[in-house]
Amino acid sequence: MAFQVDISPSALNDAEAAFLWIRKESPSYAEEWFNGLLEAINSLENFPNRCPLAPESEELGIEIRQLLYRKNRILFSIAPSRETVDGTVQILRIRHQAQERLKLQDLL
């Protein structure tokens, strides 16, 4: 299975904010964290359905899945297949596990 992975601007902003926050404490760890985050996101090219539904999925009435990476949740949806790929994984947000659950306005 080959899925295309697209990262939303909001998710990119989330990743950058987390990176900058981590870098204040440990520049070397921040780079390691960011590289690992990208690896985790890219792993969704294969079998993204392996990831469980996020708690927000039921609350919002939208299928949102989550991939845990260290202390973060990579929240994404899966769009139906297109011509050359099995589908598209849309990375919606990247949240620390301690953050509140997503609300509908967080996806707009």
Image: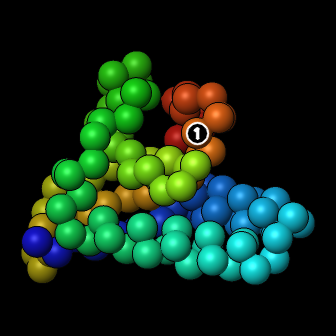
Tell me, yes or no, if residue 93 can be seen here: no
Foreground pick, 90 / 94: 94
| x 35%, y 40%: residue | 64
Residue highlighted by disc 1: 97
**Which structural element holds mark 1?**
loop
Residue 86 visible at all:
yes
Residue 101: % across, % down: 55, 29
The quadrant of the image that shows the N terminus is bottom left
Across and down, in percent, residue 53 comes to 30, 36
Is 99 situated above or below 26?
A: above
What is the image's colouring? rainbow
Residue lying at the far top of the rendered structure: 59
Among the 4 quarters of the image, the one containing residue 11: bottom right
- Please report the residue visible at 26 percent of the width from the left and 71 percent of the height from the top: 45
Picture residue at 81% right of the left edge, 60% below the top: 21
Q: Depth check: 33 or 66 in front?
A: 33
Q: How far across and down, in percent of the image, does residue 33 sit?
A: 62, 70
Q: Quadrant of residue 16?
A: bottom right
In the picture, measured across the screen, residue 88 lies left or right of residue 75, that is: left
Nearest to the observer: residue 43 or residue 86? 43
Identified at 33% across, 22% down, the residue is: 58
As drawn, 14 above or below 54: below
Position of 8 relative to 4 (above/below): above
| Type of the residue with mark 1 | Gln
Asked if residue 4 lies left or right of residue 17, the reply is: left
Count of numbered marks: 1
40 left or right of 30 in image: left
